[in-house]
Image: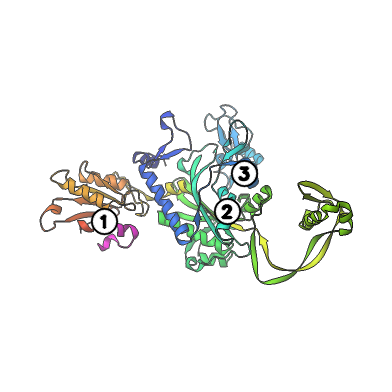
Amino acid sequence: MDTLMALFKRRGFIWPSYDIYGGVAGMYDYGPLGFSLRNNIVDVWRSLYKGREGFVEIDSEYVGPREVFKASGHLDKFADKITYCTKCGAPFRADHLVKEYYDNPDTMTEKELEEAFEKHNVKCLTCGGKLGPVEDFNLMFRTNIGPGTSRVGYLRPETAQGIFMNFQNLYRYNREKLPLGVMQTGRSYRNEIAPRQGMIRMREFNQMEVELFIDPEDKTWPRFPEMADEVLTLLPNTGSETVTMTVREAVEKKVIANEALAYFVGTTKQLLVRCGVDPARLRFRQHMPDEMAHYANDCWDAEALLSIGWTEITGVADRGAWDLSRHGQFSGTDLSHFVKYDEPREVEMDKVKANHKVIGPTFKGKAKAVTDAIEAKTPADIVDGKLTITVDGEEMVLDSDKFNVVRVKEKISGERIIPNVIEPSCGLDRIFYTVLEHAYSYDEKEDYTVLRLTPEVAPIKVGVFPLMAKDGLDTVARDLCEAVHTHRAEAYYDDAGQIGRRYARMDEAGTPWCITVDYDTLDGDLKGTVTIRDRDTTEQKRIRMDDAPAIIDDLITGKRKFSDL
């Protein structure tokens, strides 16, 4: 990883943040090539979820009030286990200190981790001192909204909550229909205890998240047949060996719970492979029951094999009704969806009815308002035989003599349900790093590095060179570079040094093709032609200079292959 990070820094992919002041662990800036590569990955993600699936995209605030994260569970449950060295005070994430001894140390209790330190003689990694007690450390960055301590807020630990906050607006925008797919990309913040894995664990990071709101009784997906034959490598939580099966087989054998979840596991594979993740080094691991997030019914992590081992880069979860139920409960807002029946149904139900013989004489002029308030309640609202209502801003607690619970038959046209959520959540920075590591190729004998980035995400699509920076070759090459350069095909002009060195620079930056303007371009039988070189094969072909922009565009989109030129 250190070798790769040095290369990425040198070539302008990523730089440590605040480096001239010693840097901050877990924080990185994107350089010119990295920014382009990251944006290209986002474009692939958008092409699938917005282009193919037709989901809508929003952008929500980074800071949220305390109440949001109390309802979501992050305030109480979003924590890692921390321990401090009793000698030097260095902090450590406790479960990471024993990961070589246990399969899922992040599920261990404080006591179990402390016992593991003793059993395996785990000491401070900094000074060798004894480790102290293990406790919870909440990962959210706290702040104040407004001056002083007027309102406590937190930097969002995920982009998802902004989508849940806007469910009512989105639901109306979608004409109160399900399914409803919403996507968002942006920064999230987690105050990691001791980030020591480069871009794999960052304190400020980028996410690409999708929240798909669906009927809990209908978790099918209309495009499922198109995904059914996609082959997945799965590691279910029922065993320790991977299995290979199609998306269809995974649903039929109940390895993946439902069509919608399986479909977006398949979509996630397509996204990652298209961006350049090696399918031979990609698997989907199901969370163990005691590993599941507090909101998840089921979850599959896309894991890539990296230099540090199998690493989660994307999660696909069935979040059930947790989010909307909690926010509806805590905010008092109706976040339900009305499901209309094909035909009205007659059902028996318990209803609260006012006792008119008591209500009239007791409340006189307010009797009708009290009756309406009583009959708007449900039996679940009765606590210890009493019913609390509000009339004209006045709260009243009514004894059982003022109402009855009766069994009635009614015809109903539908029912209100809380939508469930399927969430494909992508760690953009982790995908970014994985793409680079999987693209990295080094020939030790030749001391030669190539980044075999897929053309779709490569930050520079084509390098344009004059053979020599004189005799008009440079002028023609500059004009050609400008002609080739578009919003989709970023071109880079280079006339410094020998042509071999220029090829090497472009190979190290991941550029798929290079075009050279030589003396034959200006005169002779080959006048008006140029040489185009393929990065991966180093093969060179002669093409007409005027055709170069169209050819590069076709190569990027896959309409043509280099071998067919």
Q: Label 3: few (<14), some or many (≥20) within 10 Å?
A: many
Q: Nearer the viewer, mark 2 or mark 3?
A: 2
Q: Is residue 476 left or right of residue 458?
A: left
Q: Marks 3 and 1, Cα distance to the nearest angstrom?
A: 51 Å
Q: Is residue 124 left or right of residue 326?
A: left
Q: Label 2: few (<14), some or many (≥20) within 10 Å?
A: few
Looking at this view, name the residue that lies furthest to the left: 524
Name the dominant secondary structure of the magenta segment.
Answer: helix
Residue depicted at x 63% and y 53%:
324
Q: Magenta segment, which residues?
A: 549-565
Read off the residue under disc 2.
169
Quadrant occupied by the C terminus? bottom left
Magenta stretch holds residue 558: yes
Read off the residue under disc 3.
69
Examine the rendering and report whether any part of residue 174 can be seen: yes
Q: Marks 2 and 3, Cα distance to the nearest angstrom?
A: 20 Å
**Mark identifier at residue 549:** 1
Considering only vertical position in the picture, is 402 above or below 116? below
